[in-house]
Image (cartoon, rainbow, N blue to C red):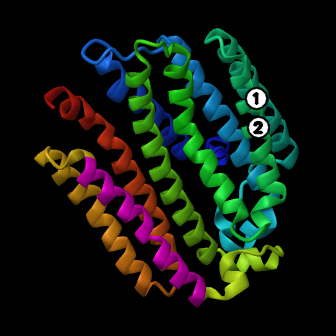
Amino acid sequence: MNILNLIRWKNLGMMALMQYLIKYAMLVPFVVPYGVDITLNGFGFSLLVLATLSIAAAGYIINDIYDVETDLVNKPDKVIVGKSVSEKTAYTLFIVFNVIGVLIGFYLSHLVGRSGFFALFVIISGLLYIYASYLKRLLLVGNIVISILVAMSLLLVGLFELLPAVTVQNQETQLTFFKIIFDYAVFAFSLNLLREMIKDIEDIDGDYKSGMNTLPIALGRDRASKITFVFAIVPLLIVIHYVITYMYSQLYVVIYFLALVIAPLIFLIIKLYMAKTKKDFTFLSSLVKLIMLFGMLSLVLYKFVLLES
């Protein structure tokens, strides 16, 4: 169980869910009615998910290794490396998960006839290491990089499923569905960046002790809270624009977004404006994850939206 907590099994489960939703809720149902061409069979796609989760798990491990000093201040009860799992074991697991992810990525890239895609797995793996060891200490840079990598976990599905199957005849359809995936990736990026900013405020004490230069350390907790409050409006505007532009004619879809995405985002913004304590920001960080989950679950609705339109 300690190793499962080390690799953040709940976060990995959510990542896998998002990828499977993209394939089986948004792509597979439209193979016949819309002529969407997908590249990977069920086994091949499961390998893609496994590669993504393996590299993400390695990222969580190396981050925990470098964060021991910080976590001893911010969350001493949840420190794993050096306590329930030795640092040597953690490093070994980091290497093993990276090797698994990169090797599967190499195989899949050649399987779909896009050998250049292999570089993505190497770059993502490398960036996760650089993030943990250096980038996260830089003002907003680490937050942006890790949020881009979260978005990439969604884009990988489009890259491996849609782009290798593009032909002159289906180009418009393939790119239309890739654009939908891209829109969700932008949503995931903005929400994850918001969560990273909230976590920086939550973890200011340990980050300061570790010599990091996060937004609340550079500008102070109050100013950072105000900036985060303003930025929280961005994902709200993205969702509202998306619903008005693409979903306005589907009443039940609009209700879903209003009740489970837009309303929670408005509530989050209000609570963020009033947040003062570490407990407040911990709650808001968890709320962002819940909003992201409901946002991704909306993929299930596309079968009804597109087939009825």
Residue in the image at 66% along x and 81% along y: 216
Based on the picture, tell me whether residue 12 belongs to the magenta stretch: no
Q: CA distance from mark 1 to mark 2?
A: 6 Å
Circle 1: element type = helix
Residue in the image at 80% along x and 41% along y: 126
Circle 2: element type = helix
Residue 269: x %, y % from top left = 38, 75
Residue situated furthest front in the rendering: 168
Residue toward you, 235 or 71: 235
Residue situated furthest right in the rendering: 88
Three-letter code, disc 2: Ile
Answer whether residue 253 is visible to the viewer in this image.
yes
Left or right, residue 228 beside residue 302: right
Please rate how many residues cluster around mark 2, counting C-alpha atoms within 10 Å: few if below 14, some from 14 to 19, many from 20. few
Residue toward you, 14 or 111: 111
Residue toward you, 183 or 206: 183
Above or below, comparing residue 165 to residue 181 in the picture: above
Q: In the rendered image, which residue does mark 1 sit on?
A: 119
- Place residue 164 in its image quadrant: top right
Left or right, residue 123 beside residue 37: right
Left or right, residue 217 beside residue 197: right
Based on the picture, tell me whether residue 237 belongs to the magenta stretch: yes
Residue 225: x %, y % from top left = 54, 82
Which numbered tag is attached to residue 50? Answer: none
Q: Which residues are magenta?
A: 222-245
Please rate how many residues cluster around mark 1, counting C-alpha atoms within 10 Å: few if below 14, some from 14 to 19, many from 20. some
Residue toward you, 62 or 273: 273
Three-letter code, disc 1: Ala
Q: Main secondary structure of the magenta part?
A: helix
Q: In the rendered image, which residue does mark 2 sit on?
A: 123
Above or below, comparing residue 74 to residue 82 in the picture: below
